Amino acid sequence: MATMTPPQADAQRSTNGHTGPVQQPLTNLHDLLTESGNEASLGFDTKSALEIARIINHEDAKVATAVKKALPEIAQVIDAVARSLRDGGRLIYIGAGSSGRIAALDSCECPPYFSNSPQQIQYIMAGGPKALASPVEVNEDSEELGQRDIARRRPTRKDVVIGLSASGRTPYVVSAVAYARARGAKTACITCNPNTALSAASDIAIVAEVGPEVISGSTRMKAATAQKTITNMITTGAMTRLGYVYGNLMVNVHMQNSKLIERGIGILMRACDVDRETAVRTIKSAGRSVPVALVMLKANVDKPEAVRRLAKSDGNVRRAIEDTTLEL
């Protein structure tokens, strides 16, 4: 398979999504912030356990500030993902190593929390599922494998493809994102270095500059924490925009075990200010669906009407209760 290159215009794209002259993407690993030495952890191997914990904690405190600076781009991606899922598209993460494992984690955690189909939010891991537990790091250097793996998912303009790479230069991820973009998909990236090939290949670049790691180059630390924080924001934000959250309650919870059943009952009691008996009775009559039960109680309608309203609102609970149609 021939190697795809980002469109020529991307050479003028900056890391915050705006256009203008920028330096050529960094390709030398040793020039990256995430590979630099960290003065705060000099002599790290001579420290006590408490000192080690303090140093790591001090560095971890920088993650939230770095992510805060990227909030405008994160918001753009939240809305892009919400639109995509609403219109029948998919969110497809792609990554390698620690970044790929974070992508897999976020993808796998959404169905039990939001009852979305596993097909809606997917992940591609360099080396395949076996690489989640047994590192296959050599795959991340292959542009051809990245293109092949994303091509198997047949990305279209309905989809959002997000590449995760702390360095922003992983060939597997860069080539996959460039391929998806050439096929019309909306593309984004989550990286921890500015001015990278992955940023240039993406429509929206989320850059969380967390700086040098406590252990130089160990991007499973601050960089991974930032990536996990950002993926949490993207999927939680998109699901909230789609109406799978009511107030701050996870109303689309999938009640498959005792803990989740209790959570569903508690959500109904809190949202509708009813006693436990009423909540249990309504959930049973709603076919164990919290959204249907919530609409029944809040709108004072029967199950068929609640189901009709939810279908009309594409599952948006607040719209179903108000029976209105609003745009995202």
Image (tube, rainbow, N blue to C red):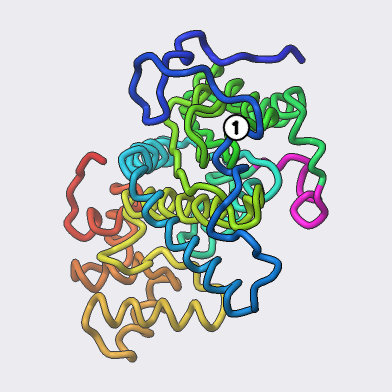
Between residue 49 and residue 311, name the one nearer to us.
49
The quadrant in which the N terminus is found is top right
Q: What stretch is highlighted in magenta?
A: 124-135
Up/down of 105 relative to 270, above or below? above
Q: In the rendered view, does 161 fall on the left or right side of 135?
A: left
Rendered-image quadrant of the C terminus: top left
Residue 134 within the segment the image draws in magenta: yes
Q: Would you say 84 lies left or right of 122 here? A: left
Q: Is residue 162 left or right of residue 21?
A: right
Residue name at image x 60 percent, y 72 percent: 52
- Asked whether residue 323 is drawn in magenta, I would say no
Q: Residues within 10 Å of mark 1 (few under 14, many from 20)?
A: few
Q: What residue is drawn where x is 54% and y is 40%? A: 33
Residue at 42% x, 36% y is 84
| Residue 119, position as x, y percentages in the image | 58, 45
Residue under label 1: 31
Foreground residue among 121 and 133: 133
Work out whether 40 lies above or below 47. above
Residue 320: image location, x then y, percent = 25, 56
